[in-house]
Image (cartoon, rainbow, N blue to C red):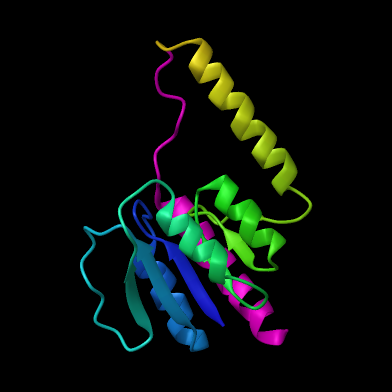
Amino acid sequence: MTVYVDADACPVKAEALRVAERHGAEVLYVANGGLRPVDHPLARMVYVPEGPDEADKWIAERAGPGDVVITADIPLAAKTVAAGARVLNHTGEAFTQANIGQKLATRDLMADLRAADPFRQGGGKGFGKADRSRFLDALERELSAATRR
């Protein structure tokens, strides 16, 4: 069982390791660089080449059944859900076979709306304590379920 973290902009890297440690799961932080190495026996930094979606490609090629992927990237989530991995975003929302199609469609619609109105500002909400707490609970559930597999 491995926890793959799409780490470039992930606000819950430390929390992911804390929960994974309780389950004895390896954590791979995948990034293009710029992140400090992690000094923990269960954690490893994986630096991929510069370029668009290189971290996503690396994770998608490896994640599968029994693994957990943490990402806010919906196309990566779709690929890893299809491969059988359990997938969460940083607020604890699960991406599943049942909801990934709708998530992709909504993402595409929002991209079209942003492209149609280049002056559109904001739209996103901040990341808070409640989001962090939901993530911790969700990751605990996912790792417990993956362990029972």
Give the extent of the magenta segment.
120-149
Q: Quadrant of the C terminus?
A: bottom right
Quadrant position of residue 68: bottom right
Residue 134, given in percent of the width and then of the height, sits at: 53, 58
Residue 31 vertical position relative to residue 141 in the rendered view, above or below: above
Kindly report the secondary structure that dominates the magenta region of the rendered protein: helix
Q: Is residue 114 visible?
A: yes
Say which residue appears at 66% left-offset and 41% top-offset.
103
Q: Residue at x 47, y 79 (%)?
A: 20
Q: Position of residue 42 (x, y in %)?
A: 38, 85
Numbered marks: total: 0
Q: Nearer the viewer, residue 65 or 132?
A: 65
From the viewer's side, name the closer residue of 116 and 142: 116
Q: Quadrant of residue 49?
A: bottom left
Q: Residue furthest right?
A: 98
Residue 127 covered by magenta stretch: yes
Question: Does 110 sit above or below residue 90?
Answer: above
* Horizontal side of residue 96 vs 112, given as left or right: right
Residue 44, image x and y in percent? 34, 78
**Magenta span contains residue 68:** no
Looking at the image, is 148 positioned above or below residue 89?
below
Task: Identify which residue, 125 or 34, lies in the foreground.
Answer: 34
Please indicate, yes or no, whether residue 93 appears anywhere in the rendered image.
no
